[in-house]
C-alpha cells in the first residue's frame, strides 16, 4: 500500500478551456460521446472548433460500427497535434433524458477511463477533461470523480479538470 499511496496524484481543478491543456509533455483530452453517432452539442463543439479530426474519426467509427468496437465503454484515440491526443469515450446511451433516465452510463465511463489510463501511462501523458458526463449526459460529479480517481490518479496519472469561465 505504501508505494501505491505515494504514487496517487490529486485531480487538479482549474478555470479554463480543456481544449487548451495547461501542461508540458504529452496530453490526452478525454471527453464523453453518445452511442448514437451524434456530435454537435456540448464540449464536442469546442473540440471541433479547434480540430476537425476527432469528429470525423468518431462519425467514421460510428458509421463502420458493424466492423469495429464502437459501443458503450469503448474509446477512440485521435492524435490532433504532435503531443495532444483526443479520447472519444462512449459513455452515454442516447442523447436526452427520458423515461429511461439520464443518458450518462457510469459503468461505461469507468471502463473507458481505464483504457484512457492505459494509453496515458504508455505515452507518459497527463489527462485533461471538462467535467465529463455532467453536462448534456445528465450525470453528477460526485459519481464521476471517484471513477477518475480509481482509474487515473490512483495510478499516478496527473489529471486536470477544467471549469469554463
Image (cartoon, helix red, strand yellow):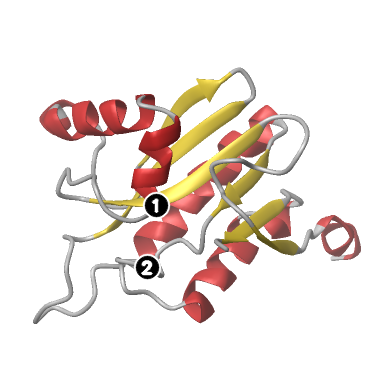
Disc 1: which residue: 43
Q: Residue at x 65, y 30 (%)?
A: 122
Q: Position of residue 61 (x, y in %)?
A: 23, 30
Q: Position of residue 92 (x, y in %)?
A: 27, 59
The mark nearer the N terminus, 2 or 1, is: 1
93 vs 17, nearest the viewer: 17
User: In what quadrant of the picture does the N terminus appear?
Assistant: bottom right
Left or right: 12 as drawn, with respect to 65: right
Q: Residue at x 17, y 75 (%)?
A: 97
Labels 2 & 1 near each other (Cβ < 8 A): yes
User: In what quadrant of the picture does the C terminus appear?
Assistant: bottom right
Q: CA distance from mark 2 to mark 1?
A: 9 Å
Residue furthest front in the image? 165
- Label 2: which secondary element: loop
Q: Residue at x 89, y 57 (%)?
A: 3
Task: Characterize the local packing of mark 1: few (<14), some (14-19) or many (20 or more) Cα atoms within 10 angstroms.
Answer: many
Q: Residue at x 72, y 48 (%)?
A: 157
Disc 2: which residue: 135
Amino acid at each position: 500500500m505504501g508505494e501505491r499511496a505515494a504514487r496517487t496524484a490529486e485531480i487538479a481543478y482549474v478555470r479554463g478551456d480543456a481544449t487548451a491543456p495547461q501542461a508540458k509533455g504529452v496530453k490526452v483530452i478525454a471527453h464523453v460521446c453518445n452511442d448514437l453517432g451524434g456530435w454537435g452539442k456540448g464540449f464536442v463543439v469546442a473540440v471541433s472548433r479547434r480540430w476537425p479530426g476527432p469528429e470525423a474519426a468518431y462519425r467514421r467509427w460510428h458509421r463502420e460500427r458493424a466492423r469495429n468496437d464502437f459501443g458503450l465503454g469503448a474509446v477512440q484515440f485521435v492524435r490532433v497535434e504532435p503531443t495532444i491526443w483526443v479520447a472519444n469515450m462512449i459513455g452515454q446511451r442516447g442523447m436526452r433524458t427520458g423515461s429511461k433516465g439520464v443518458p450518462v452510463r457510469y459503468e461505461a465511463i469507468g471502463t473507458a477511463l481505464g483504457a484512457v489510463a492505459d494509453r496515458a501511462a504508455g505515452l507518459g501523458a497527463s489527462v485533461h477533461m471538462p467535467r465529463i458526463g455532467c453536462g448534456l449526459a445528465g450525470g453528477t460529479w460526485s459519481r464521476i470523480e471517484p471513477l477518475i480517481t480509481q482509474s487515473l490518479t490512483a495510478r499516478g496519472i496527473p489529471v486536470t479538470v477544467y471549469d469554463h469561465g
